[in-house]
Amino acid sequence: MSFKVEKRQELDLRLFYLTPVLAVVLTVLSGFLLFLLMGYDPFLGIYYFFISPLLSSYGLAELGLKASPLILIAVGLAIGFRANVWNIGAEGQLTMGAIAGGGLALALIDVQAFWVLPLICVAGIIGGMAYAAIPAFLKARWDVNEILTSLMLTYVATLFLSTLVFGPWKDPMGFNFPQSEMFAESATLPIVLEGTRLHLGVIVALLVAVTGWVLMTRTIIGFQIRVVGQAPAAAAFAGFSRKRMIWLSLLTSGGLAGLAGLFEVAGPIGQLIPSISPGYGFTAIIVAFLGRLHPIGIIGAGLIMALSYIGGENAQVEAGMPQAVTGVFQGLLLFFLLASDFLARYRIRFEAHTAKRKEALAP
Amino acid sequence: MNDALVLGLITVVSAATPLLLAALGELVVERSGVLNLGVEGMMLAGAVTGFAVTVTTGSATLGIICAMAAGMAMAFTFGVLTLSLMANQVATGLALTIFGIGLSSLVGAGFVGIAIEPLPKLNIPGITTIPVIGPLLFGHDILIYASIALTGGVAWFLKRSRPGMILRAVGESDESAHSIGYDVIRVRYMAVLFGGLMAGLAGAFLSLSYTPLWIENMTAGRGWIALALVVFATWRPWRVLFGAYLFGGVTILQLASQAADWFDVPSQVMSMLPYVATILVLTIISAGPWRTRLNAPACLGKPFRPAS
Amino acid sequence: MTATPTRLELRAISKRFPGVLANDSVDLNVAAGEIHALLGENGAGKSTLVKIIYGVLHADEGEMLWEGETVKVADPHAARNLGIGMVFQHFSLFEAMTVLENIALGIENPGDMNALAERVIEVSHAYGLPLDPGREVHTLSVGERQRIEIVRCLLQNPRLLIMDEPTSVLTPQEVERLFETLRQLSTEGVSILYISHKLDEIKQLCDRATILRGGKVVDSCDPKQETAKSMAAMMIGTEVRPLSQREGSSSEKIRLEVQGLNLDSDHAFGVTLRDVTFSVREGEIFGIAGVAGNGQNELFQALTGERPVHIAQEILIDGMAAGRMGAAARRRMGMCSVPEERNGHAAVPEMSLTENFILSGYGRMGLLSSGFIRNDAAEELSRRVVKDFNVKTAGVGASAGSLSGGNLQKFIVGREILQNPGVLVISQPTWGVDAGAAAAIHEALFALAEKGSAIIVISQDLDELMALSDHLAVINMGSLSKSMVTAKASIDEIGLLMGGLHGMTEHQPGPNGGNANVV
């Protein structure tokens, strides 16, 4: 027996959408091994991590709460990744959205009106867009690598937020803690499930995913994005502007990340603090890939990655496991996913040596 | 030249060394046509491994060796995914960084707060005490000398040696290299492993010498700055050295001004300096005429699979 | 034939790729000192076979004998150690490296670089193929690049030299020069395996020919005893159908006018277009000849709007200034195009035929309603292309990449013709396409011209241009010659315009010998 690896003439779509499931299974299996290595009861570890959060309505609500920023950001990133635009600074755009919208909320802290919430949402979107406009401009104008610029800007944004909450925006009544005043009622997202922290953002995230799906599959804009990403020369042939796609994908992903940031500060946090996200902007990259850059797939992927956050917290509380396990799982998941892609794109053919060849070799 | 200036220059060189080591490794990787964005993750793996092994065994030498091995192990994972399984290089590099951050904080959890002796300095009695030249040229730790020697070594390897010529050829045209009989995948594996080794070494320098401590996520974006440096240097080793020292300068300027309160701005604003400088430098290089970009390896980031 | 010893013998070589049997039990004998032609259409399996001989590919079945002994060629190093050299069709060179480095990479034991440089100069002069070892490859013309490959082989003292379609990138004069070198080598006892589908060349040069069709050896002959027509019949398997004769256009209405077109090169290895002027009338087919890399790509981009030019008046479509318009706007004005590269330029290989129809047809064919794509209409139209142009495919849902070269080209050409273009710019219309598809494409172009379109054909295949075009002009280093009536043009004159023997003089001073305008 020998085997041969051949490129499939067409991508096996069934496998393409099945392999993310395989990747999740492999990640859970390696989680089992990891827990064993770390000296925990692996069954208990798996239970705390992947199962017990799903058993309470509180846990499920938290799942939705954490999945919504991931979905919002990942839908935007997926559009960019399809166009071969690698915005990996969503975390920075998220921060800038929170600063822009949150700053406005602080300015309007005494205003009790229905329009405050929509207004700060718009400010959040604009904040994220404006920040993503920097790498967009640099890439469209001079072809500066957007991976590096958007990432560098993330560090800058985090420092900027901390400048503000340690300085001018610090709550004067806050016992000198680095945090702003709490936002007014009018600048806080309504809760959709009584008794939990699940807010309006989850509905917005689902709507955005569906809109993203229609955009990518039914419209000429989605078509242009796909062509620019898959075959830049064909895009030039068709007359699709690559620069426009750079702007479009960075502004969309920046705006959505900004909105996600605003939702965090106007939702569960309720004020500006130095650290507003447990790395949603980076995790959303994994979500986008796990969801196969498909907006509907991203909903499922967002829920799975949200589970890794909640499971991590749960395992920390219940079994004293270090929180870093979450990061390891996220990295492993992406590795397995990328590796299993190979199965969808290549065929492995086992073949017995033919009789003919044996004859030929005989003297 | 006064003592403060000498001391300043020395700190600039220390701040630059991790950048230089990591960027030299990535330069070789990119010259072979592979883009590994996982430098940050590999550096963290090196930093935590170097620190943990040094604390556990008491041997910094063993720590450094294990740090390099850890960087190589990470790089090998990247190689299997991108070179053998043809995964997207950008996505895999990101995965490597995310994984490296998670794994290093998991492994390092038990080592937070432990202090160690920094790497020994190369002290030569009688010479190190010569004014100005003595402290400037001597009395540093071995990795600083190694980084400069490695710059020369990489430059020589790429320009003068036959394996270096083959490596450049593979990065220039994988198809051509394959059709005249070179094993493209093998050459790229070697380059990727070297990149991992150097990133691991850079990490070890951080946790064993620069700040002899383990702090979660202690690279703070240095892996990414190293990637930018390779572009800044237009894929040439000696320019990487120059760029790294320039960035070391920016870092030290920022620290010094914070300490001395030179400018009336919050410390965070000064901390933004290296990141903003990176963006500026990248823009200046990219906006330059295409001739400055001529050196970019033609096959950078493109997957290759030979027919056989 | 029995008197001369056999240098290379292949026995029942088979090689399978996914979905295709590229070589089917091929037998081949090459004698010492013989110039042996391997003749066949594109896709007949010639390149696969020689790559197996050179060790780049490995046969699934069969054996190879070198001077009477069974050998296994693991890789090109092993081939070179046996004494086999190969000049690739798409060169195996490294643009950003020097001539010397390129040569050192392609030989075993290059030794000291300075000594090697001297040997390069020595050998290259001995065979009339002058080279400057210090030059970087991207500054050289295509002909000079080929010399690197040949000299690289000669330095190894080969006993078998494989040449894969060596003349497709040369001017007629350069071809003559190459043939002299090959004959000289042959008298020195070197065997030459010469791959081509150009019958006249084979008649001129080769002692024997083996004909491949569909991966099988179908015949062998002495080219000197055959006519081009009889060899073509063996190669294609049927009688070649002559192109339908057509009357040239008599209309005076100019559909495309290009006036003093200038365009700077946009990348390091590009060519700058200078003062390109020509016009094409209704019903006329206008040919643009030239050696590859002389500005054809840039001209295509400038004409189609992939790269708009600075002055609107430099390009007039039906009298309207269009120079500053992008590709989509020019398409709306009636200018359609077919780029040279099918996969990735004219079509997106991963996308379905329907989606590939939308790619260029969405505007002209009304496939959009307020930004949404009318999928049914697009599917309907792609079905029509498939039917009208006899495209062999599993359906319009199949990906473009799954089609054979000829079928995909028919789909692409059909897609543009269905849009009823006023002006059609088509680059290398039948490159890498089988004879049946090529004839169909030529007929379709004639029919389109008949209906009053102006057609611009950019091609490196002079025979094709002579057969298709009413007028033609030659592009060389970014400048276009005066246009001439095809029927009255001589091959010699065209050859000289294509660059003649440029670069063949001893040691050219300065960096202006190449075609790249690197200043």
Image (cartoon, rainbow, N blue to C red):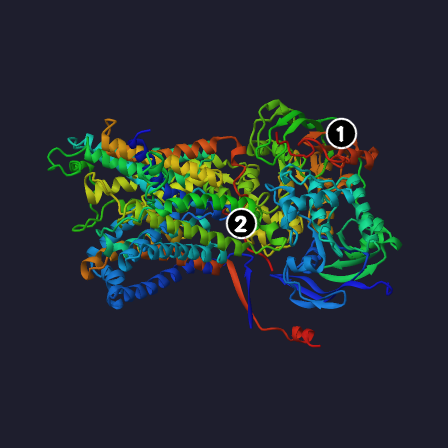
Please state the horizontal and vertical placement of residue A15, each as a whole percent of the image. Answer: 46, 60
| Amino acid beneath label 2 | Met
Q: Chain of mark 1?
A: C
Residue for point 76% across, 67% down: C68
Report x, y in % for residue C480: 71, 29
Residue C14 screen position, x and y as percent: 68, 65
| Foreground residue among A323 and C465 | A323
Q: Foreground residue, A232 or A42?
A: A42
> As drawn, is C179 to the left or to the right of A86?
right
Question: Looking at the image, which is closer to me, B54 or A208?
Answer: B54
Mark 2 vs mark 1, foreground winner is 1
Crowding at mark 2 (Cα within 10 Å: few <14, some 14-19, many 20+): many
Quick check: A116 left or right of C207? left
Q: Mark 1: give few (<14), some (14-19) or many (20+) Cα within 10 Å.
A: some
Local SS, label 1: loop
> How far is the residue under mark 2 from the one under mark 1?
39 Å
In which quadrant of the rendered image does the N terminus of chain A lie? bottom right
Q: Which residue is mark 1?
A: C483
Against B190, is C284 above or below? above
- Type of amino acid under label 1: Ser
Quadrant of the image occupied by residue C423: top right
**Residue C353 x, y percent position in the rendering:** 57, 49
User: Does the rendering let one see residue C512?
Assistant: yes
The number of numbered discs placed on residues in the rendered structure image is 2
Residue at the image position 40 percent from the left and 35 percent from the top: A135
Q: Which residue is mark 2?
A: C351
